[in-house]
Amino acid sequence: MTIEPIVQSSTAINADFWLAAAHGSVRRECGWHVAPVIEETLVLDGSGGDTLLLRSGRVVELLEVLNDGTDVTADVDFSRAGILELRGGRWTRRLGRISVKLRHGYETDEVPEVAALIATLARRGASSPGIVANQSVNGSSVGYLTAGGAPISIPLLEIERRTLDPYRLVWEA
């Protein structure tokens, strides 16, 4: 994505950008995207063991699993919580040599609070120049928080973080 469509004018709103940014905030907070169900390929480092942890809190379906280039899909058991077990073998120890193509996440009607939060974040980002850092009443001036000059407009509030607590990964995969 180029930056030009995002900064077309001070009043232009790129809804797809802000929706992606909202999803990014949730992914960063939880360690995975949460909702909706998507198809994605995860590339992982090998552990050398017989189990592997995925960056997912809800696996719906494994489509393809490659262990150092060898298709082992038929030899893998998985839990919905994101744990893979390789029957009759070991995962490679090589870095970046495990590829897992899967469908994972929750349907938005299963987690309406997450779907509503993503919509709220996108709306907040698209409609606001940022978070007010300082304000004067009689002088009519306002200052916004920035990061490198760009407005910070969709950080998660503490109550929003608590909404996401049940979906946060408890391990680093």
Image (spheres, grey):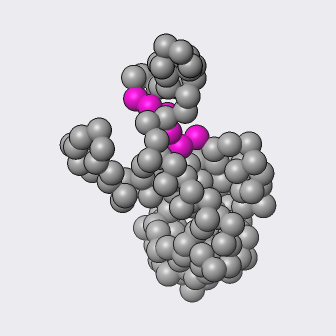
168 lies left or right of 146: right
Relative to the observer, which residue lies in front, 5 or 131?
Answer: 131
Number of numbered discs visible in the structure rendering: 0
Q: x%, y% of residue 51?
A: 71, 65
Q: Would residue 27 be seen by someone viewing this image from the given angle?
A: no
Q: Quadrant of residue 6?
A: top left
Q: Determine if the magenta segment contains residue 153.
A: yes
- Image position of 169 with respect to 50: above or below: above
**Residue ID at (63%, 44%):** 156
- Magenta stretch, residue numbers: 150-155
Q: x%, y% of residue 91?
A: 61, 63
Residue lying furthest top: 139
Q: Determine if the magenta segment contains residue 152.
A: yes
Residue lying furthest front: 138
Q: Main secondary structure of the magenta part?
A: loop
- Image position of 160 with respect to 62: above or below: above
**Residue ID at (68%, 42%):** 157
Q: x%, y% of residue 143?
A: 49, 21
**Residue ID at (70%, 50%):** 160
Q: x%, y% of residue 80?
A: 71, 76
Relative to the observer, which residue lies in front, 50 or 117?
Answer: 117
Residue lying furthest bottom: 74
Q: Would residue 166 be seen by someone viewing this image from the given angle?
A: yes
**Residue ID at (37%, 58%):** 15
5 lies left or right of 169: left
